[in-house]
Image: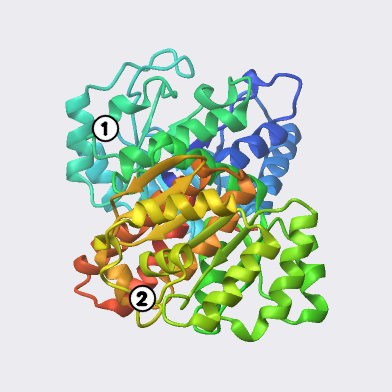
Amino acid sequence: MTDCRKQLLLYAVTDRSWLKGKTLAESVAEAIEGGVTMVQFREKELKGSELESEALAVRKVCRAHNIPFLVNDNVELALKLDADGVHLGQDDMDPYTARRLLGPDKIIGVTAKTPAQAKAAQEKGADYLGSGAVFGTDTKKDAKPMDAAVLKAVCAGADIPVCAIGGINAGNIERLKGSGVSGFAIVSGIFAADDIKQECRKLLNKARRIVHPSYCPNDTVQKYLDTVADKRPVVHCITNIVTVNDCANALLAAGASPTMAHHPMEAGEFAAYADALVLNMGATESLEAMLIAGTKARQLDKPVVIDPVGCAGSAWRRKQCLDLIGSVTPSCIRGNGAEILALAGDLNTGQGVDDKYDEDRPGLAEAAAILSERTGAVVIASGETDIIAGEGLIRKVERGSAMMRRITGSGCMLSALLGAFLAAENSPESAYACCTWMALCGEEAERRTISESGGTGTFHLRLIDAMSLMSGARPV
């Protein structure tokens, strides 16, 4: 049996009748780029070589994007094309026989309109159930809308995931909240859209909120996540050796691409190639490279983030950071409260790179605003409450997890991620969205850590997991 729960989230079922001057393969490619997680080839009007040729073209697109490709009803065609699986109706081949022919690793879905049908399909080896038509559908003229109570009963009684199907679109999908489904199979709601990619993006965001309530970035956050996923910005980081791997993995999880070159002889070239630059004062041995890279990024009008690690405890480091800020004129400065206070007032305010009393310090918001006005940068003071100052406004993010303070690198990861978000849009709103998203990822990581009875090591891994699951970014 194959665990296909994640792939069911946004399940596109093809229909050539909706093509608008494009090939079916082109339409499927747009759907995948918009976020479709699995594709079913369902073209009942095609026969013979035309059927096989069209199926091959769609399979090629799916394989190129690492998306499962299933065939509707036709086990013989699925075998011939080495499809990733089949979907079977109640009048099609028995799922037990299909499993014997296809093997243990292929996905087998079965239509189930009642709890009894669901139980039988599960016992015969189905990997998932397709239930509906939840809203009625034009695809099958005789399909009657499924009672909501029956859908809930099917989901409650199944040990395998259930995918809702039938008349689902962006306007009605949220009516399925609380049904227990793991995903949504959609035909015209995808392929009849004028902009298939954009429609899939809307559907995916709504599907996530229904199936995974804890993975619920708001619309503003989602907008920037989508832009990062589309653009895949290259973020060049000159950062400290303690967190370089964490920063790289965080950027990859968000859909960005990290580079980490520190040598002065190549820093300028990497900065010119990148879409954003992140300079972390934990790497004081690379100050020359930071200045070279920062100067190049400034010349090319690319966003620069400076992380003043340790500036609260070292007058020398603080001076170097202030000099760098003056030379580079960064788009964003992000540190903990003690570091921001130190830069704003040129004072020693803490003993190290962390200060557990950041958010309690008087005047922190005012200090962030002063530093922002002085430098022209968006200034972020991270802590239990993140304070974001920019363009004369103060915003706060009062979310996150206390466990983020108990691992190395959470602040450095946020600085790296700010590079990706600012590459998407260089604005205070983008920075605010990044801080909000990081906080949501921390909350989800804590929830999963507690459910696994884990500690800080588990939380560290789950934080990266949460980023990758919430970003919607696809593997290249």
In the picture, which quadrant includes the C terminus? Answer: bottom right
When the figure is inspected, residue 144 is found, relative to residue 405, above or below; the finding is above
Please, what is the three-letter code of the amino acid marked with disc 1?
Lys
Q: How was the colour assigned to the protein in this rendering?
A: rainbow
Task: Name the residue: 54% across, 83% down.
Answer: 316
Q: Using the numbered discs, state the Cα–Cα distance from disc 2 to disc 1 in whole angstroms.
A: 42 Å
Q: Is residue 77 in view?
A: no
Left or right of 241? Residue 385 is: left
x%, y% of residue 31? 60, 36
State the SS at label 1. loop
Task: Please give the label number shown on residue 177.
Answer: 1
Q: Nearer the viewer, mark 2 or mark 1?
A: 2
When the figure is inspected, residue 431 is found, relative to residue 452, above or below; the finding is above
Near mark 2 (Cα within 10 A), the count class, few <14, some 14-19 or many ≥20, is: many
When the figure is inspected, residue 117 is found, relative to residue 401, above or below; the finding is above
Task: Name the residue: 80% across, 61% down.
Answer: 272
Left or right of 132? Residue 85 is: right
- Identify the residue at the far bottom of this view: 285
Q: Please name whichever residue, 441 or 238, is drawn nearer the observer in this view of the structure.
A: 238
When the figure is inspected, residue 120 is found, relative to residue 410, above or below; the finding is above
In the picture, which quadrant includes the N terminus? Answer: bottom left
Q: Please name whichever residue, 269 or 31, is drawn nearer the observer in this view of the structure.
A: 269
Please, what is the three-letter code of the amino acid marked with disc 2?
Asp
Q: Which residue is mark 2?
A: 354
Q: Is residue 316 in view?
A: yes
Q: Please name whichever residue, 304 or 464, is drawn nearer the observer in this view of the structure.
A: 304
Q: Earlier in the sequence, mark 2 or mark 1?
A: 1
